[in-house]
Amino acid sequence: FSFGDYFKRDAIAFAWEFLTVELGLPADRLWATVHNDDDEAARLWPQVTPIPAERVLRLGDESNFWAMGETGPCGPCSEIFWDFGPEHGDGTPADNEERFLEIWNLVFMQFDRSADGTLTPLPKPSVDTGMGLERIAAVVQGSYSNYGSDLFTPILDAIAARIGRAYEAEGETGVSFRVLADHVRAAAFLTADGVYPSNEGRGYVLRRIIRRAVRHYWLLDVSEPVFYEIAPVVVSTMGSAYPELLDHESSIVSILRAEEERFLLTIDRGMGILDEELSKLGPGEPVPGDAVFRLFDTYGVPPDLTELIARERGHGIDHAGYAMAMERQRELSRAGSQFVTPGTAEIMITGHPPEVLISRPSRFVGYESLDVNTAIEAVEKTDGRIWLVLQENPFYATGGGQVTDTGTIEGNGFTLRVVDVRRGGDVFIPLAELAEGESSKVVEGAAVRATVDAERRADIERHHTVTHVLHAILRKRIGDHVRQAGSLVAPERMRFDFSSPTALGPAELEAIEDEANRWVLADLPVTKEIVPIAEARARGAMALFGEKYGDTVRVVTIGEGASVELCGGCHVDSTGQIGLVRIVSESSAAAGVRRIEVVTGMRAIDETRRREALLAEAAAKLRVSPDELPARIERLVEEKREAERSLEAARKQAHAGGDEGGERTTMVDGFQVLTLRAHPVSMDDLRAIGDAVRNRIASGVGVIGAEMEGKAHLLTVVTDDLIKAGRLDAPRVVRELAAFIGGGGGGKKHMAQAGGKDVGRIDEALERAPEIVGGLVGE
């Protein structure tokens, strides 16, 4: 940029010198264009460079005039083109884009355009120089395409090796290769900058980039992740110029792999749905638009991929129906956007601050005071709710993950309950409900006392400060690649999302919790300062990706620089005020993002007591003390394993025909009578064995005998054909056999059971079963 320093003559000379001397490009391969009305630039080119006048073209506004907008600074442009040679056709830069490539642009900002279109010369005309890095690299290296330069060839080579086919620029797969190369580079940079795949904002952009790439290698018959294996090549190619790639390589790889695997699994499911839809269609019928939309909306399968697969099977897709379904979804989204959730489960308020309030003056004093005497600067009443602008406002508005304050506003003849606080530009605007008195007295100029719920704010401050503590500890223990990826700071708990390719184990979580509590015991000072942003960065202050910061920022520092972050939230004055820190859970929040939930202060004590109560309840149910609980649970687990082993053995015995001498089959009146001595550990096991026996018998009766806990048990099963024919049922059989073991029994027609005390006669009952069954059939 030149702001009034030099203008057209020097700008043209500098550009020519750089291209022909520094880069060594042949002068006879360069052309220039100027604006139709820019006689000065047209005259200067042949004067200050050896370029002949016939290679200086005059073009119109569309290509050679730049403007900031409809009004404001503007001016003519002068562009420099590279000639790839006659093998790419005849013509000039004005009519042959295949042969000529723009590599440089000089914008001569020399006018100020008014609303009526009048151009007034600027007092200090300026130059804005633009050059395409990739284009220059390609030209210098003798490549016709950006993708032929060494910025892309290593990536394309890696893609070819991974996919198992060569890159052919002019082939059918060339476009897919180039999309993959371009998209993996974009995804690597976004991830290094702290963006994570999600369904909103910049995370959604990253997710779409990855999914579009997955679609392209899916079309190349590759159904396994590709990006994560190519990303290290991007890092090695560009890491020296962009060290953030090197710093975050492991997280880049893990995040890309997780997102690819998730989407590939989704596509697999989507393909199953598409198969079902295609099976319903007649010859040549298109896939319905609603189905195409569902595949895209639910499974992420793009419409063009659906159409490609459908056409391979002789079908198209209903484009009009898809467009209608998409528009319905947009309408629902627009309707839903009218409802705003202020970031806490406690409050759900609809609507936005009235625009009339946003420009009214108000000073936030909530850092210093939670109870102030002030006055109402402006008020708007809508749908039973009251929006307020206070001259001095102590109520914090939701922001930076911290939830809104609540409290009261008291005036002459009314008490308001503050249920939410919204941001209107730089103004915090409380939203209140009438608790007592008359709303008609809530007017501009009324003197009021505004009081924040102090206990609730104190809990919020503890949880906000502990996010900074945890952020610093995680970066120290896990690595500098850890970055905050989101948070919720509420009075009940704190939720902290951070970048990490792997989960934290119990030992690691315990160590992190211990370190946080050591910070608390050290009672480190927590200072808050407003400083120039340059000074904040010099101190190493951490900034959140995507947040916008002004020339001055608020810096929150813990101790002697143990944690330094840019933050506008509310904090304790020293770490000792945080109290006990307990990590409640650790889980996955998204691909490459972990989530820790924490409670502090009395909330942490409540959590500890809750866990102790659960432990005491479990111990009481098992009739042991809490200290004996682990050993008792281990015994129960082993008993369960033994029971499962016994059940499995019994089932195998029933299916395979029992152990040696334990099973016998006798034909009675044309059907089978199968007897079996089994060894179950419970009545459920015995019934499961009975089911297995009944399933094995084509037609007949099964009798199973067993001893459990010193008692004799008999179970009988009868197949459906005998029951339907009225020949036999299980209760008749088991009642006759129960006499052998000194007991009685009954049950349903297909299965009945009996119990008795005479264990010694179980085998006799089984031996006599065929005879008894035969007698019952003859009755």
Image (cartoon, rainbow, N blue to C red):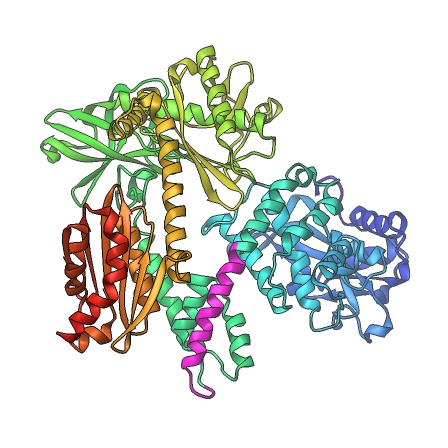
Relative height, residue 496 to residue 214 (above, below): above
Q: Give the residues in magenta.
A: 262-284
Percent across and percent down for residue 269 are 47, 64
Q: Position of residue 2 (x, y in %)?
A: 72, 42
Where, quadrant-wise, is the N terminus in this rendering? top right
Q: Residue at x 36, y 32 (%)?
A: 633
Q: 376 or 8, which is in the foreground?
A: 376
From what the image shows, is residue 389 above or below residue 333? above
Reply yes or no: does residue 272 show up in magenta.
Answer: yes
State yes or no: residue 85 in magenta.
no
Q: Main secondary structure of the magenta part?
A: helix
At x 45% / y 50%, what residue is drawn?
200
How many marks the image carries: the answer is: 0
Q: Residue at x 43, y 75 (%)?
A: 276
- Foreground pick, 673 / 242: 673
In the rendered structure, the answer to whether residue 734 lies left or right of residue 493 reads left
Residue 646 relative to residue 592: left or right: left
Give the percent coordinates (x, y) of residue 390.
27, 28
Left or right placement of residue 716 versus residue 426 in this view:
left
